[in-house]
Image (spheres, rainbow, N blue to C red):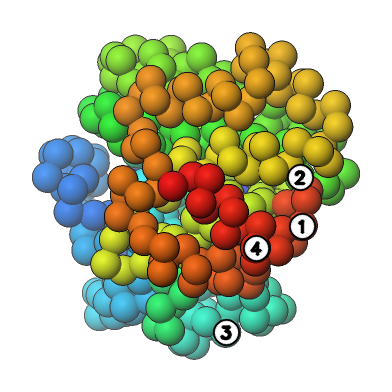
């Protein structure tokens, strides 16, 4: 068992989920709300976790694939009506981000837009909120150790709420919870983790510890993702992928970049409801090429780890693990690209890309990824 105190407390081990009731008790939580989704409920995993408790927690299972403010308000209403005093985020990044937003509302009034990074909302966020345990069931977003909650606000924009107070009280990471994840979701979430490691490492901020963590995540995740996609029961591959996801998010406190500046508005297109990790995978090769002129020796470091030119290797990996051929195949139209290229300039990840992009640059990156 590894107990790590970095950004927050992390309990990482196969079988660690059995500690959930005890950890909640440590935090003083007597009646938790579990925020999850219907897909995870259908697998039977939620029922197995509920069986760990002598008194079953309240469950909110209506988290959408891209969490919305509407869903957050529904979950918060259930939290209040049920007299809950803490929250568990159980699932992929969507469930964890929704849980974080519900937690925020336990000490702050709605609406959520006022707390977003682009509105300077961090100054309004304080720590007088309920305890939270984040339990990831995918190896992708790393939201369990992230200080952000990314939500589609009531205005229809997909925005990040960022604050150190948004970090979960405890991240409970059990690789066994990912064994049943199907190949496509393993691939899509895994590419999310790799994109975090790559973008963070390329970022211009001086943060050697974050760079070192990102590179360790890349070294673990790159060889493991193919193995996990091919055999979901591969214990070492699942362990390495969950650690890579954790490390990607530990490191991206340094900042992300153009990939995420684009995937956030793309993910806000309600009629498509596109998967975040899949978008990251498709956009990554073009952004790597765009950043190459300004990242110097970092390109060579990534080349050594990946075994070839990073843009070419990631494109090959996408093909090998079944990612879509491009944005057009995912339903993204020229009209959508025009709007997204403008929205990317307003995203909180825009400013931390190593090469500052213009609207025309973003349009080019979308076209290259079509």
Eye-nearest disc, 4 or 1:
4
**Mark 4 or mark 2, which is nearer the start of the sequence?**
2
In the picture, measured across the screen, residue 347 lies left or right of residue 54, that is: right
Q: Which residue is mark 4?
A: 360
Residue under the image location 71 percent in, 23 percent down: 302
Q: Which residue is mark 2?
A: 203
Q: Nearer the viewer, residue 134 or 212?
A: 212
Q: Is the Cβ of the residue at disc 4 closer than 8 Å to that at disc 1?
A: no
**Mark 2 or mark 3, which is nearer the start of the sequence?**
3
Q: Is residue 14 visible?
A: no
From mark 2 to mark 4, how far is it between C-alphas?
Answer: 21 Å
- Residue 211, above or below 82: above
Number of the label disc, if any, that sits on residue 114: 3
- Residue 51, above or below 266: above
Q: Is the Cβ of the residue at disc 2 closer than 8 Å to that at disc 4?
A: no
From mark 3 to mark 2, how far is it between C-alphas?
Answer: 27 Å
Residue under the image location 31 percent in, 68 percent down: 270
Q: Which residue is mark 1?
A: 356
Eye-nearest disc, 1 or 2:
1
């Amino acid at each position: 068992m590894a107990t790590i105190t970095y950004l927050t407390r992390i309990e990482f081990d196969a079988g660690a989920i059995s500690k959930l009731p005890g950890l909640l008790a440590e935090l003083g939580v007597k009646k938790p709300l579990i925020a999850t989704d219907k897909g995870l409920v259908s697998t039977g995993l939620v029922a197995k976790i509920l069986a760990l408790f002598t008194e079953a927690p309240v469950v909110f299972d209506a988290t959408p694939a891209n969490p919305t403010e509407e869903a957050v308000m529904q979950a918060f209403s259930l939290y209040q009506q049920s007299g809950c005093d803490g929250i568990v985020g159980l699932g992929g990044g969507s469930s964890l981000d929704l849980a974080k937003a519900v937690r925020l509302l336990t000490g702050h009034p709605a609406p959520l837009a006022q707390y977003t990074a682009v509105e300077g909302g961090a100054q309004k966020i304080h720590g007088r909120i309920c305890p939270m345990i984040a339990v990831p069931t995918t190896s992708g977003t790393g939201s369990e150790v992230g200080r952000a909650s990314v939500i589609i606000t009531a205005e229809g924009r997909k925005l990040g709420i960022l604050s150190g107070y948004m970090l979960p009280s405890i991240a409970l990471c059990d690789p066994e919870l990912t064994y049943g994840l199907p190949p496509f979701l393993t691939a899509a979430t895994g590419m999310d983790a790799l994109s975090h490691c790559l973008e963070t490492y390329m970022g211009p901020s001086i943060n050697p510890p974050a760079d070192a963590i990102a590179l360790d995540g890349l070294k673990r995740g790159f060889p493991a993702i193919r193995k996990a996609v091919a055999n979901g029961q591969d214990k070492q591959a699942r362990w390495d992928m969950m650690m890579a996801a954790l490390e990607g998010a530990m490191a991206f406190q340094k900042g992300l970049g153009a990939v995420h500046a684009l995937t956030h508005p793309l993910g806000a297109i309600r009629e498509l409801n596109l998967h975040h990790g899949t978008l990251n995978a498709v956009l990554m090769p073009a952004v790597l090429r765009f950043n190459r002129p300004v990242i110097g020796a970092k390109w060579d470091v990534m080349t050594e780890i990946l075994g070839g030119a990073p843009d070419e290797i990631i494109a090959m990996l996408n093909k090998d693990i079944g990612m879509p051929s491009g944005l057009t195949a995912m339903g993204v139209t020229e009209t959508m690209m025009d709007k997204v290229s403008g929205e990317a300039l307003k995203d909180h990840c825009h400013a931390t890309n190593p090469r500052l992009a213009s609207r025309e640059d973003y349009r080019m990156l979308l076209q290259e990824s079509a």
